[in-house]
């Protein structure tokens, strides 16, 4: 993945902003030459997470090539070992037996050869026949940002942790051809093996404003040839980074190995959007004989498409876990403070909790849920049952650590009659725009109701995660919001009202919510994982034992908290 703009007010000194133009395509970087190698002397703990993945200090971004191999989970990730801003990127490497507690190892890949002298960017891992893992990654070969695809292999397969990796001298394996933009040609996902005996990989890119997933094929994984046509492209979407392509079963909850084909399978194509810094995915059908992917007509194939996460979530990568027959998704959450803040605190970026991915029974979207292993960190537990919330009610959840918690709640209501009318003008807006107009403090009919997380007792600071139900042309529209507008008294922060619409059946008049609260992140799963939103927040007062958690209702229709289970979360071992 390529670095793009962060919230960089307050730090203009020594910053070099530049534009690279090649074949009519531009890419922008914010590079802090004097700060890339400014090692953290002190690491501030106030907003560091307790159970999300992050190294002891410095900058991280994309999860690269996660895989399961011989009983061990491997997480590779983009990391600056010398500072808390982007730069000096290596493939850092940590291992785990449970996806929650991690042991760091030495970097697996770092710039050292002509084919990656100027950078080792994102890629993926594939396990070849004979149980031989291989990494494909994007190398930067010159100051013009020319991108090529390289490979690396373990130096010693008998090492259970695969500590050392070798980059053979026959790299690069793939260079861009005439007509392909050399500066937007990157991030190969896990390869899959066709029934014709040929391996296939995708490479993200663009031509002008059209996002493209180029397809390459090989019989021996060494000699690759570009297919006549991309597997898919979409006009107006801009550059595609970090593409991911994999099958999901039409029924059941088991994940599928990346090469699985068949009538009982749909395929997912996910892309990360360079222009917007969010992702979208489509579900569709893959035609292997033609090497063509055709999305279903159930969601837009553009910026308005379905997202894994409607909040701070980018550069995601999935892998198949054969030990538990599941597909697991990793995603990166950048900071929402300033680069100056990151340098001061000595760190930037986290990986969100790994999630299992399955197909919704409606066949129109994916469901996501935190991996089961996360439950092992649950500690002290409290429960609320049949708690009535009238308009304006705020009920505290005590007996746990609200700043580091896991909360599952089911809300119910007697009637849909008081749902507000959905303004026809809002049909042209996305959910985030609607949420910014109808926040948690705006009284409604059926909602807003939900959780007020990382809150002060007087609500000077709080991050509400809530639902609001509308009626629109004879049907009901469910809006889910994670609103950081009032999350902090600090001014220089990005505090959006992240939101997504939830495609859920309201026949039983119930909505469920799970929120993972971890000091500076609130990661939420609505309606069993139909819609997910992650927010980065930086309270100044609602920290540690000064943080509070509330269930609230600000709508005319009374809401019942049927069950609310909340747990203090233990701290994971990630160092």
Image: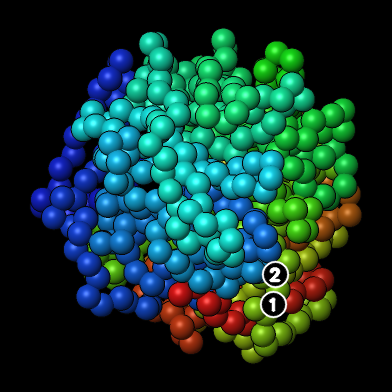
Where's residue 14, x and y in %? 10, 50
Q: Label 2 belongs to which residue?
A: 373
Where's residue 186, x and y in %? 43, 32
- Element assignment for label 2: helix
Dot 2 crowding, Cα within 10 Å, few <14, some 14–19, many 20+: few
Task: Tell me, yes or no, if residue 141 can be seen here.
Answer: yes
Which is more toward the observer, 14 or 502? Answer: 14
Q: Label 1 belongs to which residue?
A: 376
Q: Quadrant of residue 399?
A: bottom right
Distance of mark 1 from mark 2, alpha carbons? Answer: 6 Å
Dot 1 crowding, Cα within 10 Å, few <14, some 14–19, many 20+: few
Image point (53%, 18%), residue name:
225
- Element assignment for label 1: helix
Image point (82%, 40%), residue name:
249
Tell me the quarter of the image containing the N terminus.
top left
Q: Would you say 378 lies left or right of 160 here?
A: right
Classify 316 as above or below 47: above
Q: Quadrant of residue 567?
A: bottom right
Task: Tell me, yes or no, if residue 280 can be seen here.
Answer: no
Image point (29%, 70%), residue name:
345
Classify 195 as above or below 486: above
Where's residue 454, x and y in %? 51, 73
For the residues bearing labels 1 and 2, Cβ distance under 8 angstroms: yes
């Amino acid at each position: 993945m390529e670095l793009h703009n962060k919230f960089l007010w307050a730090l203009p000194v020594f910053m070099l902003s530049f534009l690279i133009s090649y074949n009519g395509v531009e890419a922008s970087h914010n590079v802090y030459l004097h700060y890339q190698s400014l090692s953290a002397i002190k690491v501030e703990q106030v907003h560091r997470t307790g159970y999300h993945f992050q190294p002891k200090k410095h900058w991280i971004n994309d999860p690269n090539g996660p895989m399961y191999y011989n009983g061990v989970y491997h997480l590779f990730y983009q990391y600056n070992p010398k500072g808390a801003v982007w730069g000096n990127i290596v493939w850092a490497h940590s291992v785990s037996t449970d996806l929650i507690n991690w042991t760091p190892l030495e970097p697996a890949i770092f710039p050292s050869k002509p084919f990656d002298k100027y950078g080792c960017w994102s890629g993926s891992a594939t396990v070849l026949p004979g149980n031989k893992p291989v990494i494909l990654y994007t190398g930067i070969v010159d100051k013009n940002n020319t991108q090529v695809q390289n490979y690396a292999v373990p130096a010693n397969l008998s090492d259970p942790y695969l500590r050392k990796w070798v980059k053979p001298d026959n790299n690069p394996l793939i260079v861009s051809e005439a007509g392909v933009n050399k500066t937007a040609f990157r991030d190969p996902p896990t390869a899959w093996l066709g029934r014709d005996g040929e391996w296939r990989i995708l490479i993200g890119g663009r031509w002008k404003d059209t996002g493209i997933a180029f397809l390459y094929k090989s019989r021996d994984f060494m000699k690759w040839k570009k297919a006549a046509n991309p597997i898919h492209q979409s006009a107006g979407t801009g550059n595609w980074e970090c593409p991911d392509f994999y099958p999901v079963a039409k029924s059941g909850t088991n994940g599928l190995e990346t090469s699985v084909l068949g009538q009982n399978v749909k395929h997912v194509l996910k892309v990360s959007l360079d222009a917007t810094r969010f992702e979208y995915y489509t579900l569709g059908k893959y035609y292997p004989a033609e090497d063509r992917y055709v999305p279903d007509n159930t969601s837009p194939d553009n910026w308005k498409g379905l997202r894994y996460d409607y909040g701070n979530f980018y550069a995601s990568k999935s892998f198949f876990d054969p030990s538990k027959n599941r597909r697991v998704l990793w995603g990166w959450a950048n900071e929402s403070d300033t680069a100056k803040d990151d340098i001061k605190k000595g760190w930037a970026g986290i990986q969100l909790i790994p999630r299992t991915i399955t197909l919704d029974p409606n066949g129109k979207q994916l469901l996501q849920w935190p991996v089961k292993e996360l439950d092992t960190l649950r500690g002290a537990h409290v429960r609320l049952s049949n708690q009535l919330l009238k308009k304006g009610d705020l009920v505290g959840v005590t007996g746990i650590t609200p700043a580091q918690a896991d909360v599952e709640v089911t809300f119910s209501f007697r009637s849909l009659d008081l749902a507000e009318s959905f303004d026809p003008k809002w049909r042209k807006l996305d959910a985030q725009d609607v949420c910014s107009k109808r926040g948690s403090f705006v009284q409604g009919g059926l909602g807003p109701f939900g959780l007020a997380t990382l809150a002060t007792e007087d609500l000077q600071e709080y991050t509400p995660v809530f639902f609001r139900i509308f009626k629109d042309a004879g049907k009901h529209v469910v809006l889910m919001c994670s609103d950081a507008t009032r999350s902090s008294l600090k001014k220089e922060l990005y505090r959006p009202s992240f939101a997504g619409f939830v495609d859920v059946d309201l026949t039983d008049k119930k909505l469920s919510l799970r929120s993972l609260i971890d000091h500076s992140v609130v990661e939420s799963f609505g309606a069993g994982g139909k819609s997910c939103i992650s927010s980065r927040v930086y309270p100044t007062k609602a920290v540690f034992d000064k943080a509070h958690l509330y269930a609230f209702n600000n709508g005319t229709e009374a809401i019942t908290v049927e069950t609310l289970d909340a747990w203090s979360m233990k701290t994971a071992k990630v160092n």
